[in-house]
Structures are given as structure tokens and as C-alpha cells.
Image (tube, coloured by chain):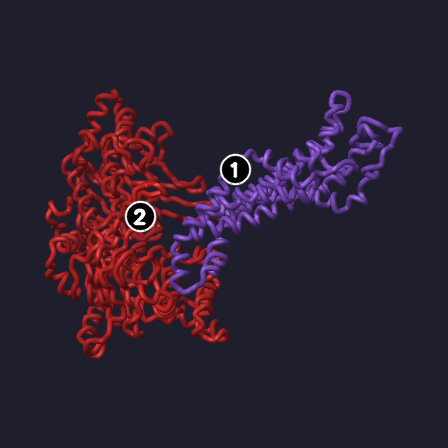
Chain colours: A red, B purple
Amino acid sequence: MSAPLLSVRDLSVVVRNGEGEQTLLDRVSLDLAPGDILGLVGESGSGKSLLCRSLVQLLPSRAISVTRGEVWMGGRDLLALGDAQIQAVRGAEIGMIFQNPSSHLDPVMRVGDQIVEGLRFHRKLNRAAAQEEAIALMGQVGFTDPARQFAAYPHEFSGGMRQRAMIAVALSCDPKVLIADEPTTALDVTIQAQILRLLMELRERRGLSIILITHDLGVVAQTCDRIAVMRQGRVVEVGDKRDILARPQHRYTKALISSHPSMPTDEANDVVDDKVDAARLPAGPARPLVEIDDLHIRYPLSGGVFGRRRSFSAVAGVSLQIRAGETVGIVGESGSGKSTLARAMLGLIPISDGHVTFDGASLRLQREATLTKMRQQAAMVFQDPFNSLNPRLTIGQTLAEVLRVQGKVAPAAIPKRVDELLRLVELDPDYAGRRPRQLSGGQCQRAGIARALAVDPRLIVADECVAALDVTIQAQIVALFQRLVRTMDLTLVFIAHDLAIVRNLCERVVVMHHGRIVEEGPCAEVFERPREAYTAALIAAIPDIDPDRRLLAPPGLLAS
Amino acid sequence: MSGRARAKRVNRTLIAGLVLVGGFALAALAAPLIAPYDPIFQDGTARIQPPSLTHPFGTDNFGRDILSRIIYGARVDLQMAVIGVFFPLVIGTVIGAIAGFFGGVVDAVLMRLIDIILAFPFLVLMLSIIAILGPGLSSFYIAMALVGWVSYARLIRAQILVLKNADYAVAAVSLGFSWRRVLFRHLLPNSVAGSLVFCMSDAVLVLLSGAAISYLGLGVQPPTAEWGIMVAEGQAFLSQAWWITLFPGLSIVLLAFGFSMIGDALGEAMGVHE
């Protein structure tokens, strides 16, 4: 490795609160070579973002401070610089992009002007030159019509384009180092592949060094040269990508690799075995538990009293049958209508056209009766574990309320049943006394699953229920679902944008695009031999943990 | 700022506010015990006396002791603030919750009603209602309830509109909970924080408009001691006897200050400003 461009030595950061000091970063040392991409991997709270913010003295709170260590770049210790000097480093030498471009772009400023701002401040260009340069930059990061898009506002772009705009803003000051903090976490797989490819291109073309923060080892395997694994404020392992992926030394790295969804797990194999088990398959032409027939869901767009009625079709003619005991995955990009379909399936949103039948009862013809039946036999698990539990109620109160309203358990037996439910989702019964805010994301999601189980349901619809969780936690939740499906007589509809998880968990997969089903069939078959080009593009965009299986996708399809 | 430092500052503001409001409340409760004179007794020999040992806040043009009148006045003014806030809060919360939760026609009708009420200047509307009902405190309360609920309704409606799409609300519906349970047990408790904070600053407004109404002769009737009337009556003598106006005016300001400090502290503690 050549002489490092950026070198972090023994960096320690602590937070002081009422009780004393708590170490957030513990003697972290890292090197970044020119033109290198360093992947910083770890779970939320492991200190990856904090580390990068410390480099440019952007600590999130006054109570947090650097206690020791040095950050060397260009012969200076960045931590020793004064306010004015570090401000010249931020942007000009170290640029940053973030997970959520919409909250880091100014919504009332034209995208082009936000790029011009950096060019004028750091590179002292005049207005005309800056504008020309900004348009050139927008072209470089993949805007198709930069001259026109210069004048557009952030809300006019999709998430992927906004991320490109942020990259252009960061590049406007011509930094040597780009810190990308989970830049693709909020994006669909196909868009993620595009952004990752863009970052690699920029590295080639501009000799940029990149620190890529991510929780997805697949992303790292596809893009980075070196990997640093962080856990609880320490770098537990650092080295060449291939060495670490092939021969992980630290226990945590091994766990991280084995819980990556593109790795077939043992439990997934169990499910495959189950599928062969004839006893589990419904015998003969059993009546499907859920039957969806030519379903349309439309939302009125503009309107008011006098506006012309226009509408947007979120679901446009979907037919689907789900048999009792089946595990069905619904995949698709954001906006493909999969969540809308899930909610319609449970009678939570009005149906514009078509039929939803639950256990022989039609939601259209006998609405009240069907809803009553659904409420007693079906339950939903949501994406955001914190937002899906009432913040004012303890977990125990939440579960007890469901049991009380459902009335399937005698009032005296409710506390015992709450304990059982918590055990079922592998939570300690003591958690009954806690509120959602006192739990971690994974624990919250377990509580959400317990709430669904409190209904004693035949059908569980899980809407992106692992999307907000760290990978190792994701793997645990998926394993929990696998166990529940195996041991209880459950039908599971699992909605995800992450195809790899669906592949591990489900027997059958349904691929949605623009409100329609483009392909469906047994998981193994669809993933091995996709019939539709769209499905193939989706599958190819999954970053595999094996660095030699490149992100291959026909570029024409992804651009659409 | 760390949680503890913030908690400390919140506590200090809260305590200061409680001390001010509590002090006035105590004075109001114990008025007959601590007031040195009868608040409406007119001492012909002691008219317009400046503050002295016998009359610490001086006397007015009828020879009444200002301190005693302020202490008795606290009874009326506190009552005005509490009742004048309570009914609008309750009415506004229920109406706002229903408008936000059901949406559609119900919402449109209720919101237009609010627009109509807001189209009139607050005091003009209050005065017209009181003029119809006849002067007096009960008219003031009724007018307050009829006009004041709109702010609460809008606050709560906005909260409910956001919260009803929260996953836990959808979850509650999907678990077969009745709409009453979803609205009143799950949504409302999570949406009242803003209104509770606002009702403290609203208490200030109620206090001031009560004083204004009394000042115009439509609220509390003389000779009852009330701070707004005292300010009004003292106005004529402002150049010779500043104390007649200053002390009741100061009481209004202090009580208002106390309420708004409690409101601020509550807001910080409940994270409303974040």
C-alpha cells in the first residue's frame, strides 16, 4: 500500500453525561490510501458515522468530545486545526454524502444552485464559470439533461437522482476524500447498484478516495478494496477485502458474514426440506385462504371540490391466491404497490375494483362479516418497529389490550398468555414492563410480532418488517419467522424489497412492478430461472457477498 | 446539551412558574385571612394615598386598599383563567379529534366553521356574544367557550391527521379495535402534549382578554375587585396616582408570566418543541 492519504491514529471519543463518561470510540486506527475505497462495516451504534464525523470535527453534541488521537492528512493533524482552518477542510478536502439525500438537500433551493454554492465558496469561481462547471458535474454523476435539470428542485427528483445530486454537491469542491454514510440504504436494489457503480467510476476518473459506511457486507464485497469492521466503538478487524471475506478472524466478522442474506443458511435448507414434506402441502384443490381477483386500488390525485378528477393506480389488476400454510414473498421496488396490496388484503384500505376473499368471505359482498373474520384470524407486522407500537403503552399493556379486545383468552389468563407470547418471540417476560423507547429495534420488532401472534392468527402479513434492522438482527427475525411457520399453523405473506431474504424464507415468490404482478412461482425456480427481464434485473442487482460475482445487470433495464 | 442539564433547566423554569401561579392561588384561597382590609370598604378619609406602611400599595379614589383588592382580585382572575381555558380545551380537543380522524365531509364542515370564527377579530366576536348575552362573568365564559376552542381544534386535528397514519394506528385497526378505542386510547393521548403546552399560553390570553372585557365594562361588574377593572378605573388618575394602575397591572403580568413559564417547561419536558 502506498503512503496513506488519511491516517487515523488512536482516536478515542467519549460522551459525558450526568453519570460520567462513556467511551464511544476506543483507540481507533485506520489508513486510507489514495484512490482506495475503504468499507466501514458494523451495526447501528457501532460508531462508524461518529468516526467519520470526528475526522472533520463535526461532533453531533457538545457533550461528545475527542479525548485522544490524531487524524493526519496532508501533513497536518486535522483534530488540532482551529474553526476557520477545519472549515476549509470540510468540503474542499473531505466531502460527505449521507443516507437520506432529501434531508441534506435544501428543499427551497434549485439543485444547480446548491452545487454552484460550493464551487464559488471553495474554488472562488465566478457565477458563469461556476454554473458551467455545475452542469458539467451533473452530467458526470449521471443526470441525463443537466442543463434543464440544473433549475429543478430536489422534490422533483426520485431518491436515486437526489443521491446523485448530493454526490455532485460533495464533488463540487473537488475533495480528495469522499465519506459516504450509508448512501444506498434508503434506495431500491437496482438504484443502489447504479449509485455504487457511479462511486466506483468517480474513483477511477478522479482518483477519489472513498470511505463507504454501510451495514451491508454485500455492498462492501462489490465495491471496496479494504474493509474495517467496527463493533462497539472499536475496529475489531481491518484488512484487504478478500482476506477478510475469505478468512474472517474475529467472531463478530464471522457472524456478520454468515448472517448475510445471500449466504444460504442451514435454516433455509430446513425450509426446503419442509417443502418436500408432503404433509405440509395442502392436499388436493383446497380452498385458498386468501383469494385476490383482479384487484384495483386507485388514489385520487388532484382534486378539491372543483378540480378535475385524476387518479393514480397503486395496484392495477392483481390476481393472487394464497393457500393455507403457504409462505409467500412479495417483492418489488418502492412504489411497486406491494404495501398497498398487503393493506388491501387485510381490508385496511378501500378497494376500487375487484375482489378480496378471505376464507371464503368476500370483502366486497359481505364487508362487515369478512372484516370481523379477518380481524380475528389475520394480523400484520410493520416496517418501522418503533412507529408500530404505541409509545405510551408498555409492551405488556399493548399485548394485554389485544388479548382483551379479541376475547379469545379468559381475562384471568391474560398475564400468563402475555408471558407466553413474549417467550414465543424469544423476549424475556420482564420486557412486559418496558416501553418501546427502552427497547432496541430488533426487540421492538419481536414485540410487534408478539402482538400479531396475540390474535392467534391463521395469516400474518409482514410488510418490510426487517428493512429497518441491522443484518445480524434481520437474520434472527427471519429465523424466528421460520420457526413460527414451522411450529404453528401459519400462513405468511412476507413483503420485502430484499430478494435474498425472501429467497431464504419463502416457498413462493410474487414479483410486482408498477402495481402489477410480473412474475410468480416457486422461489427456487424464479430465482434460478427468471422468465421476465425485470425479475432478472432485480436479482442481478443484489450485491453478493462473493466479490467475484460482480453486479451484472443490463444497463438499459436499470436506467428505465 | 446533555439530558441532565436540560432536565435541570426545565425544572427551574417549572418551579419558578409554579411558585408564581401557586403564590397567587394561595393568596386567592386565603384572601379573607391575609387581606388587611375589606376590598370594597370605602374609607372617605384615605382617598388616593400613596403606598405607605398602613396601605402598602396605596389606596384608590374611593379610599379602598389596593393590596386587599389585588388579593381578592386574584380569586376572580384565576377563576377566569382556569374556566376560560378548560371549556375551550375540552370542546376543541373533541371537535379536532373527530375532524382529523374521520376526515372527508365531517372535516370539511368543521374546518369551514373554524374559518368563519377566525374570520372575525377575536375581541369583536367576544364582545358581540357578551353583548347579546348581557354583561357578566358567565357570559364571558360562554363567549370564551364558543370562540376559544378553534385553536385547540386545529392543533389536535393536525396531530391526529399525522398520527392516524402511524403504523400503530393502522395496527390497532387491523387488530379489530373499535374506532373509539383507536381514537381515544391510542391517538388522543399521543396528540395532546401540544395542546397542554398551548393552554398555558392561552391562559395568558384569556387573562388579558378577561381584563380587557372588564375594562370595557362587560365583564366583572364594580365594585367587585378584579385586576382589569382596577386598571381601567385607575387610568383617569394616572398622572397623580400611578399606584392605582401599576400594581394590578403588574399582577396581571406576573400571573401571565407564571403560566407561560409552566407552559415552556411542559413543552420542553414533553418534547413538543423538538
Instruction: Tell me where residue A507 appears, x and y as whole percent.
Output: 20, 67
Relative to A539, residue A271 above or below: below
Residue B161: mark: none
Mark 1 lies on a secondary structure that is helix
* Distance CA(mark 2)–CA(mark 1): 30 Å
Density class for disc 2 (Cα within 10 Å; few <14, some 14-19, many ≥20) is few
Residue A300: mark: 2
Instruction: Tell me where residue A167 appears, x and y as whole percent.
Output: 24, 37
Relative to B274, residue A527 above or below: below
Density class for disc 1 (Cα within 10 Å; few <14, some 14-19, many ≥20) is some
Residue B144, image quadrant: top right
> Please, what is the three-letter code of the amino acid marked with disc 2?
Pro
Instruction: Tell me where residue B236 appears, x and y as whole percent.
Output: 74, 24
Q: Residue A19 versus residue B71: which sits nearer the camera? A: B71
Relative to B23, residue A355 above or below: below
Q: Is residue B253 left or right of residue A467?
A: right
> Please, what is the three-letter code of the amino acid marked with disc 1?
Leu
Q: Residue A219 versus residue A421: which sits nearer the camera? A: A421
- Residue furthest right as drawn: B45
Q: Residue A82 versus residue A204: which sits nearer the camera? A: A204
* Label 1 sits on residue: B118
Q: Residue at x 74, y 32 (%)?
A: B230
What is the chain identity of the residue bearing mark 2? A
Quadrant in which the C terminus of chain A appears: top left
What is the chain identity of the residue bearing mark 1? B
Q: Residue at x 22, y 59 (%)?
A: A318
